[in-house]
Image: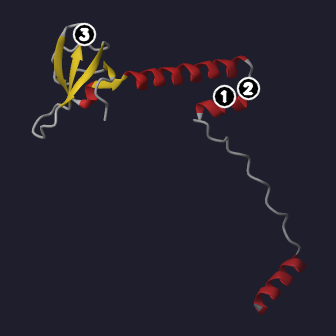
Amino acid sequence: MLRLGERIVIVDDAFEQNLPVGEYGYIIAYDRNPDNAFDYVVRLPILGRNFFVPEGDIESEEQLIKQEVDRVEREALLDFALATHNEKLFFQIMNGDAEQPEAPEPTQEAMSTADFIKQVNLRAWI
């Protein structure tokens, strides 16, 4: 839930109220009526008006800036990995920081017939 007075950005216009998508505004009230589809009352200084908006139509400015910074950082790391031919970094970025699967270790060498019979006899006693 967003705080009162928090700066927000209009990201959608679900109810086609002619909201200026991409513009900023401020939360001035909560709409607590359970029969209403709107969650917030937002003041848009560019229009000098208040609008009732659902939660999906607005996003916190801080959150949008953080998402943009993460995207730019990921692109810069990807460009660096490609420029330096760093395959490990490239796979780490593309797979979401997951470890690259290692090659399976070779299995143990086959036991000789005598060792196999010895193992079977030991287990038979248990």
Task: Please report contact status of discs 1 and 3: CB closer than 8 Å, yes or no.
Answer: no
Looking at the image, which residue is at 73% across and 51% down? 104
Amino acid at dot 1? Phe
Query: Which of labels 2 and 3 is toward the front?
Result: 3
User: Which numbered disc flags the more N-terminal residue, 1 or 3?
Assistant: 3
Circle 3 sits in a helix, a strand or a loop, which is it? loop
Looking at the image, which residue is at 82% across and 87% down? 122
Return the mark for residue 46: none
Question: Is residue 124 shown above or below 18?
Answer: below
Which residue, given by chain and number where applicable, does mark 1 sit on? 90
Q: Position of residue 75 (x, y in %)?
A: 58, 20
Left or right: where does residue 97 sit relative to residue 118? left
Residue 87: quarter of image: top right
Which residue, given by chain and number where applicable, does mark 3 sit on? 45
Looking at the image, which residue is at 45% across and 20% down? 65
Query: Which of labels 1 and 3 is toward the front?
Result: 3
- Quadrant where the N terminus lies? top left
Task: Please report contact status of discs 1 and 2: CB closer than 8 Å, yes or no.
Answer: yes
Left or right: where does residue 72 sit relative to residue 56? right
- Quadrant where the C terminus lies? bottom right
Which residue, given by chain and number where applicable, does mark 2 sit on? 86
Question: Is residue 81 shown above or below 22?
Answer: below
Gap in Å between the C-alphas at discs 1 and 3? 44 Å
Q: Position of residue 93 (x, y in %)?
A: 61, 30
